[in-house]
Image: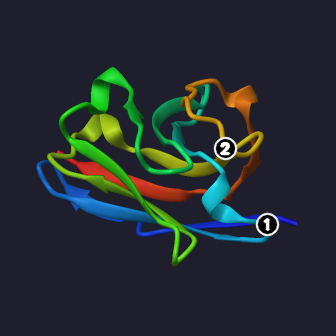
Amino acid sequence: QVQLVESGGGLVQAGGSLRLSCAASGRIFSNYGMGWFRQVPGKDREFVSAISWSGGRTSYADPVKGRFTISRDNAKNTVYLQMNSLKPEDTAVYYCARRKGPLIATNSPALYDYDYWGRGTQVTVSS
C-alpha cells in the first residue's frame, strides 16, 4: 500500500515562500513520476507541477512557471515543491500524487493519470 503525506503548508504573506514536502511509503518510489495539484473550495482540482521518475523532466502549469520548482530526493522517498513569490491566488489545498505505472518518461497534468493521493496541506497567502 502506498501512502503519501504532505507537509509544509501554512500562512504566508504575498511575496513570501514555502516549501512543501511529500513523503512516500510503500512500493519503489524512485520508479514513479510524481505530481502536485491544488484545489480551492468549489473548484476542480488543478495541476500545478510534475516530475518524472528520474527527475530529469519537470512540468509546470502556466500560473506557477518561474515561481515554483519541483524536485525529488529518491533516497528520502520525498518530492518537494518550492514556492516563491507567492500570490493570494495560490491559496489552496495542495496535494501530491503518484503517477500510474512505473518508469514513464513523460509527465501528465491529468488527474486520471495518478493513482495514489495524499490528504493535502493547506497553503494560505495573505495580501
Frontmost residue, 114 versus 93: 114
**Residue contact at pointers 2 and 1, CB within 8 angstroms:** no
Q: Which of the pair 63/122 is nearer the observer? A: 63
Q: Quadrant of the N terminus?
A: bottom right
Disc 2/disc 1 C-alpha distance (Å): 13 Å
- Residue 98 relative to residue 16: left or right: right
Q: Secondary structure at mark 2?
A: loop
Q: Position of residue 50 (x, y in %)?
A: 48, 39
- Residue 46, compared with residue 18, is above or below; it is above
Task: Identify the residue position indicated by label 1 in the image.
Answer: 27
Q: Which residue is mark 2?
A: 103
Quadrant location, the C terminus: top left
Identify which residue is drawn at 52% across, 49% down.
Answer: 93
Q: Amino acid at mark 2?
A: Leu
Residue at 57% in and 36% down: 41
What residue is shown at x 61% (from left), y 25% (from top)? 44
Q: Amino acid at mark 1?
A: Arg
Crowd rating for badge 1 (residues with CA inside 10 Å; few <14, some 14–19, many 20+): few
